Amino acid sequence: MIHLAAKPETVKSLDEALNLLKAGEPVVLDRDGQPLAALISMEDLVLLQRLTEAEENRRDIEAADRVMAEIEAGRATLIPLEEAERLLDTIKD
C-alpha cells in the first residue's frame, strides 16, 4: 500500500496511483502522516458495498430476533400499524 501526501505535487503521482489501483493495490492519501482518504478499485468498492449491506442486514435481523424474544417472553406485544401511527401522531402534536 502506498501513502501519498495530499499536496498539489502529488497530482504528478496520479498516474502511479491509478497503475497501483489497476494492479489491485489500494492507495491511501494522507496529510502530515494522517490518513485522509483511500482510492480503491471499482471491484473493491462493489465488495465493500456488499459487505456493508450484509452487515446492516445482520444487525436488522439481530434486532428483530431481540424483539421477537421479548414478545415470546411476554415482555412486549405487537400492535397494529394503524395504532402505532396514531400513537406517533399524538407524540408529534
Image: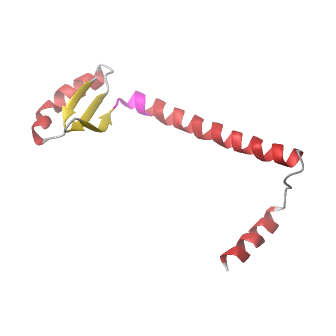
Counting from the top left corner in percent of width and height, residue 54 is at: 59, 35
Q: Is residue 42 magenta?
A: yes
Magenta-highlighted stretch: main secondary structure? helix
Give the vertical position of 38 relative to 22 (above or below): below
Q: Quadrant of residue 57?
A: top right
Task: Return the residue nearer the eye: 53 or 71.
Answer: 71
Q: Residue at x 28, y 32 (%)?
A: 28
**In the image, which residues are magenta?**
40-45
Give the vertical position of 15 relative to 78 (above or below): above
Q: Quadrant of residue 4?
A: top left
Q: Residue at x 78, y 47 (%)?
A: 67
Give the vertical position of 2 relative to 7 (above or below): above
Give the vertical position of 57 relative to 19 (above or below): below
Quadrant for the C terminus in the image: bottom right
Task: Return the residue nearer the eye: 91 or 21.
Answer: 91
Counting from the top left corner in percent of width and height, residue 85 is at: 75, 68
Left or right for 11, reference 53: left
Identity of the residue furthest to the bottom in this view: 93
